[in-house]
Image (cartoon, rainbow, N blue to C red):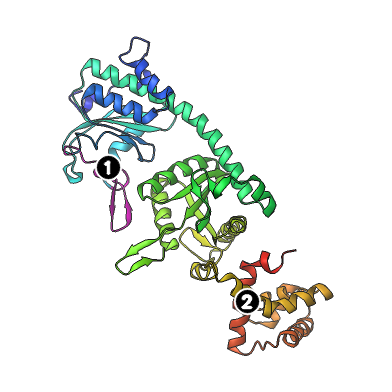
Amino acid sequence: MGSSRNASSIRVLERSYDSGTPHWQDFVQAIVTGGKYRGVAELLSKILKVPVFIEDKFFRVMWSTLDREWESAVPEDSVVSHSNGSYHKPQYDDPQIASYVALARKTKRPIEMPELPTYGIRAGRIVFPVALSEKEDVEAYLHVFKTDLTPFEMETVCSALRALLVGVIAEREKQKLAEEIRRQMLLQLFAENAAQRRQHFIEEGRLVGFDVTMPSWVVVVEARPVPERSADVVLALESVLSDKSIRASVVPMQGSAILILQEQVVLGQLGSIHWDVQQCLERIYAALSKALPDLDIRMGIGRRCCRMRDFGLAFGEAKKAMASHRSNSHAKGHGGIANYYPLNLVSLLAQPGYETSLIDFAKSLLGPLDGSSQKNSTDLIGTVSCFVENKYCLQTTAGKLYVHPNTLRYRLGKVAKITGLDFQRPDDRLQVELALKIYDYYKDDLCPS
């Protein structure tokens, strides 16, 4: 294995394996007992007496021995690099390393890589791709920091690779079961019926290690034109979240992925600084687009979730934002991110402790209209909302509502009589627009029925 030419001639997956292969049973035992990446990496490193690490298909380090006695020779932080908060991985951004990755994915054979002083790596290595077959994509990469492997050492590495393949197959089935459980729990979390949520939800508000009692955001992530690749989207998301130390829970659902993003507090010199969810999502989106360049990634986001019932509403809003973004090129959003509400307004509306004042304000203005609507079977709140959305244009609003302009004038006159609002006054316009936003946001509290 002294040259890259010899390294590329080995077809790891076509080798024959039997019980006589060195340490085969030990590696399988590491998989069976649940060690998987950790067990294989540590055992292989111990046998070869060299550093070893294993990455998944999106280059998330699953386990590494680089932080042991090898740390001074091969620093682990060279594997993933972040600069000024932006997302950067050499596997995507460095042409030299990207070419090695492309060759490994194409040939499914080991690739010898030289020292990389730019990233602080002062030792050569062989990268072994782990794939179930020549036709399937690479599932993981095994990095062995030694280029002159003896035949016995190569056989040992082959045993480790075969054990990793067993682990990949087992992990797929395990993930399917875990994802189905999490999907069912998410469906209960998003259920419209509050009693149903309380009945089925897990104790202490924890969803598979995720604390839903903390302020959170529900994000629907969609990959087009291949929705069946939602599993890849989930893996890529998990890799990005791990790299950036973002607390979140992610699971595939109906051709998309659901991301529950827990709000974080950023500490600055003057104390706590409010977390910028838009900036966080833009970074996740940029990283995801880099990891999956062949897919068109879209994200939809709803309200800020402070109470249990908010999650179901936020999920519906995120889906609506996604649908609106697909059909309307002028929809609110940055790049592939569509917001159901302006996020600054959401942060204001969703502050714990403000609900009572906000709801009372909306009730005082719109409550009488709701009562009159129920009595006369005329949706006065809907009429006002449509009038506001169409920039207070009488003709356009009448057309949208399929009524005669005179009918609309009568309804607006009725609204003015009930509420005292004058749509010609800027202050009244501001009040009604804010009341409508609060009405939409707290609809369950304003209209319990």
Quadrant of image for the C terminus = bottom right
Q: Is any part of residue 135 visible from this angle?
A: no
In terms of secondary structure, where does tag 2 sit? helix
Q: Nearer the viewer, residue 319 or 176?
A: 176
- Asked where in the image residue 32 lies, by quadrant, the reply is top left
What is the quadrant of the N terminus in the image? top left
Note whether 347 is above or below 5 in the view shown.
Answer: below
Residue at position x 46%, y 50% from top?
248
The residue indicated by pointer 2 is 435
Cβ–Cβ under 8 Å for marks 1 and 2: no
| Residue at screen point 59% across, 57% down | 323
Q: Is residue 193 above or below residue 232?
A: below
Q: Nearer the viewer, residue 131 or 312?
A: 312
Residue on which disc 1 sits: 79
Name the residue rendered at 33%, 37% in the picture.
Answer: 102
Give x and y (percent) for residue 7. 25, 25
- Looking at the picture, which amino acid does disc 1 mark? Val
Where on the picture, by quarter, is residue 303?
bottom right
Distance of label 1 from label 2 (alpha carbons)? 51 Å
Q: Looking at the picture, does residue 196 appear above or below residue 265?
A: above
Relative placement, left or right, of 134 versus 417 is: left
* Mark 2 residue crowding within 10 angstroms, few (<14) / some (14–19) / many (20+): many
Q: Position of residue 402 (x, y in %)?
A: 76, 73
Q: Which stretch appears magenta?
A: 72-93
